[in-house]
Amino acid sequence: MKSEEKRMRKYLLYLALHAGFFLSSLSGLCAKLAGRQEETWKFFAWYMADLALMGIYAVVWQQILKRLPLTVAYANKPVGLIWAMIWGSLIFQERITLKMLAGAAIIFAGIYLVVTDHE
């Protein structure tokens, strides 16, 4: 049972890590939306949402770093770029190209290599 419990904690830790990257990507989304606003109050609202998300992300990141080696945590950081691609496509109608998908595949292969090598 100990081995299964340890594995579950590890999965939850990686889930928290990627939830943090998701929050970070939402922060970038808010910043981009803030920059597109013409009315000051709308800009301010999006900017405050950006700051709030970055504050939450900072706390999550620090907690992750307490529990994971820095190399493993940082190796997973490019996942935020994948989220940025998704947000760009869904919200801003930006095109996802084959080169972008190939880059994402290389990123995930690198993450896999670092994480599995660490185990």
Image (tube, helix red, strand yellow):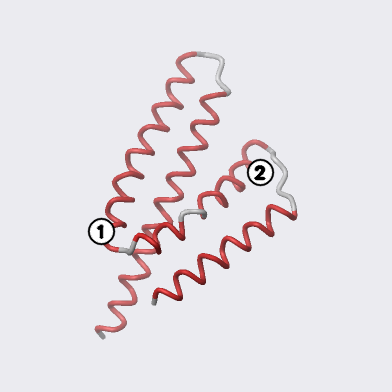
Say left or right for 32 vs 115.
right
Q: Residue furthest right?
A: 98
Q: Nearer the viewer, mark 2 or mark 1?
A: 1
Residue 115, given in percent of the width and then of the height, sits at 44, 70
Quarter of the figure that contains the N terminus: bottom left
Q: Is residue 74 above or below residue 6?
A: above
Residue 12, given in percent of the width and then of the height, sits at 35, 65
Quarter of the figure that contains the C terminus: bottom left
Residue 30, given in percent of the width and then of the height, sits at 49, 33
In the rendered image, which quarter is residue 17 located in? bottom left
In the rendered image, which quarter is residue 3 located in? bottom left
Residue at the spot of label 2: 89
Q: From the viewer's side, name the closer residue of 116 and 82.
A: 116
- Looking at the rendered structure, which numbered label has been put on residue 5? none
Rounded to the nearest angstrom, the CA distance separating label 2 from label 1 is 34 Å
Number of labels in the image equals: 2
Say left or right for 85 vs 99.
left
Residue at the spot of label 1: 66
Pick whichever of labels 2 and 1 is earlier in the sequence: 1
